[in-house]
Image (spheres, grey):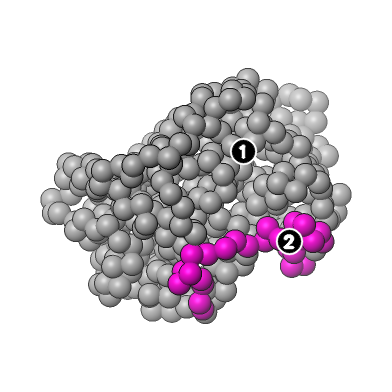
Amino acid sequence: MSNRREFLKKVSAGAAVVSLSGVASGMSARSYSRVIGANDRILVAIAGLGRRLGAFTEPIALKSSNVELVYLCDVMKKQRDRAATVFSKLIDYQPKLENDIRKVIEDQKVDALINATPDHWHAPGTWMAVKGGKHVYVEKPCSHNLREDDLLIEFQKKYQKVVQMGNQQRSAPESIEIISEIHRGVIGEVYKAVAFYANSRGEVPMPVAAQVPEGLDWDLFQGPSPRKPYMHDTWDYNWHWYGWDFGTAESGNNATHELDIARWALQVDYPERVETEAAKRHFANDGWTMYDTMDSTFYFPGNKVIKWDGKSRNAHKTYSSDRGTIIYGTEGTVYVDRGGYRLYDRGGKLVRERKSGGQEAGTALGGGGDTSTLHVVNFFDAIRGKADLRAPIQDAAISNHMIHYQNVAYRIGKPFDVCTETGKIFDRDAMKLWGREYQPGWEPVL
């Protein structure tokens, strides 16, 4: 479609979603219990009002979405106030401001939760909401560890709610088009994908003991994670790099997207073997405690391979872009990213190129854009039974396993084999990191 804005309007009205679902998950929109009527208003809450807030403003503000924002929830007061100001320019009513996600979930009027909290809250916030009768759009990564991926599938299966992960490129029309062509053999038999990310993140402060920032509910920020004293600058994004209590490193932060595209293109599930080399290569004396450079290889049945090249603090564009996926086949190659795709024949000649013409955040902090809007609108339409989910949790959790596999391989310092049927790891040291310890009272209960 030449006019992307017009396309957005059509998709948000539900006119084009089903027509694009040929490569969807196979998760029928009619399979969920208590599907909301096609024309009913959906009452929505957002939990987590940080840098991803911009991904939700347009899909909620669109009149064609027919949703009402009833809660803005965050453990930091200034985040709630900022979000209220943002939405005051887009909607003509005032949502409630709430500190505690549990109170939002208890409100039976709420139909759907957008869960954009930090990583350690993604799975617990989602299963609490699903158990409380809510449909959930959960930001990537959908979990903090491998066990939580499996738990999310179990909760969705039991409570039959719509659960979509925020790997928004699954809703990009250009990606849908070229992946569908790959599956039909446009580059022959696919055998390998290289997924990559390069950024120039700088030094981060040392995490030293400090007073809890004004307006922050530190106890609730920690939520399901065992309690610890507050350390300087932890709450504001740097929790990504300060150990494993809250974050999942760059793997969970960004590899989630590209590895998902690679797995989608190759039509594979669990790998047979995972090998990872990773280390902290930059700013040796700063507060960053995890790797900032990672190379991983995933071996799959059928002699298929996916490689990850992640550089958090070296922005060299090895593949001519800062993020994307290259898919190799016996008769050609495809390069795909958030900006579109390029199709090459086996001799390396450009056959066709399609650019998105839209805006979707790449490596800059923050987020949002046309593809995010499409993905959230797809979630709304699935709730109404008008579309199939683009990234249902049953499939998204398998992609999410890949980010945890390479984190585990880094942490134990060795490769391991994986059961291709169950996803379990054939290594005792690795399996010690399968789950996590929870703060007493926060353990998952189906």
User: Which residue is under mark 2?
Assistant: 431
Residue type at tag 2: Met
Q: Residue at 27% across / 57% down in the picture? A: 99
Q: Quadrant of residue 432?
A: bottom right
Q: Position of residue 115 (x, y in %)?
A: 40, 57
Depth order, front residue of 199/441: 441
Depth order, front residue of 176/225: 225
Was residue 432 drawn as part of the magenta stretch in this picture? Answer: yes
Depth order, front residue of 400/411: 411
Q: Residue at 86% across / 49% down in the picture? A: 303
User: Which residue is under mark 1?
Assistant: 290
Q: Position of residue 255 (x, y in %)?
A: 61, 42
Question: Is residue 241 left or right of 33 when viewed as pictured?
Answer: right
The quadrant of the image that shows the N terminus is: top left
Report the span colored magenta: 421-446
Residue type at tag 1: Met
Magenta: main secondary structure: loop
Q: Residue at 81% across / 48% down in the picture? A: 415
Which callout, 2 or 1, points at the residue further toward the start of the chain?
1
Q: Position of residue 206 (x, y in %)?
A: 49, 31
